[in-house]
Amino acid sequence: MEHRVSNAQLDELLEYLAEHSGLVSGECRGTRSKEIVDKQWNDLAKKLNSYETGSSKSGERWKKYWADLKHKSKTRLARWKQASLDGTNNQDLSDVDKKVLAIIGERGPPVFESHPVVYGSSEHNLMTSDVVIEKSELLSPSNSVASLESNDGQEETSSIHAESTKATRSSRTRPRLRLKRCRSTISRPPQTSPVPKWVIELERNRVHAENKMADAALLMVNAANKIADAALRQTDVMNKVVEVVGQLSAMLPRNNNQ
């Protein structure tokens, strides 16, 4: 009985296919395209079969395994889209399905990305305002009274009124301090009008048709796998028949001599 494909073998298979687009499409340019593709699958089979745990397959069987995996992922994607339109989708696709769909170029579930706020750009609705601070406010006469403690413990109050008045006068001739404050607002996606019902219905029918096509393709793959297995078993039987006939033919001369 053939063992199941291990996770390590599956990761190696997907990584290899992501780097070799010719194996994904099953096509390769050139007059010897089929030979090149078959050789690549045989080389990949040697890598995958070298794992201690997992399954051991020929290049042709690994190719069929990939076709089966690809169609199953497309089927689950179609069902995921149908459930999203019906409002009953509460599950996400598996990581393996997402990797397979990315390799074959199928559009999977949407990915929501967060964008950082960029300061100094008009695209993010930045607003600036000036904060004007008068120097006279920094040296206000009402707050310019200092309490001094004398040596004998008595409190003496010394007013620095004159110094604050000079500071106030000098501030009128000096430029004012301007501090720029930047306030950013996170941009929100634009409001869109509700989608018409006929558009939703059209999309639902399209996804339903894709789902049916994926199911039919999966049935065809399963049928092809069964035919291939039957052909392999038939080949084994024919080899045994040829072997038995060869043994019988080798025994016939001995009987004639006797």
Image (tube, rainbow, N blue to C red):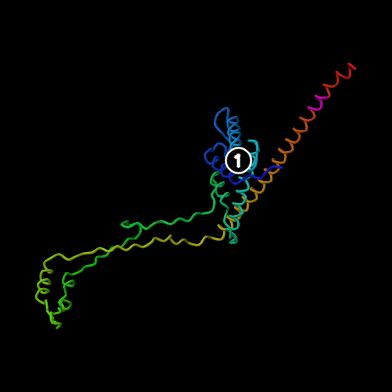
Neighbor class of circle 1 (other Cα within 10 Å; few <14, some 14-19, many 20+) is few
Instruction: State the residue position of label 1.
Output: 51
Q: Which span of residues is magenta-colored?
A: 243-247
Compared to residue 55, the image places residue 95 above or below, namely below
Tell me the quarter of the image containing the C terminus: top right
Locate the N terminus by quadrant.
top right
Task: Looking at this view, name the residue that lies furthest to the right.
Answer: 258
Considering every residue shown, the one lying at the far bottom of the view is 154
Q: Is residue 53 above or below residue 170?
A: above
Q: Is mark 1 on a helix, strand or loop?
A: loop
The prevailing secondary structure element of the residues shown in magenta is helix
Q: At x 46% / y 61%, what residue is drawn?
A: 192
105 relative to 140 in the view: left or right: right
Asked where in the image residue 113 lies, by quadrant, the reply is bottom left
Residue 55 location, x and y as percent?
A: 65, 42
Amino acid carrying label 1: it is: Tyr
Q: Nearer the viewer, residue 253 or 14?
A: 253
- Residue 59 lies in what quarter of the image? top right
Tell me where residue 42 appears, x and y as whole percent.
61, 34
Relative to the observer, which residue lies in front, 31 or 208?
A: 31
Viewer-side residue, 48 vs 130: 48
Quadrant of the image occupied by residue 173: bottom left
Q: Does the magenta stretch include residue 252?
A: no
Q: Residue 254 in the image: x percent, y percent? A: 86, 19
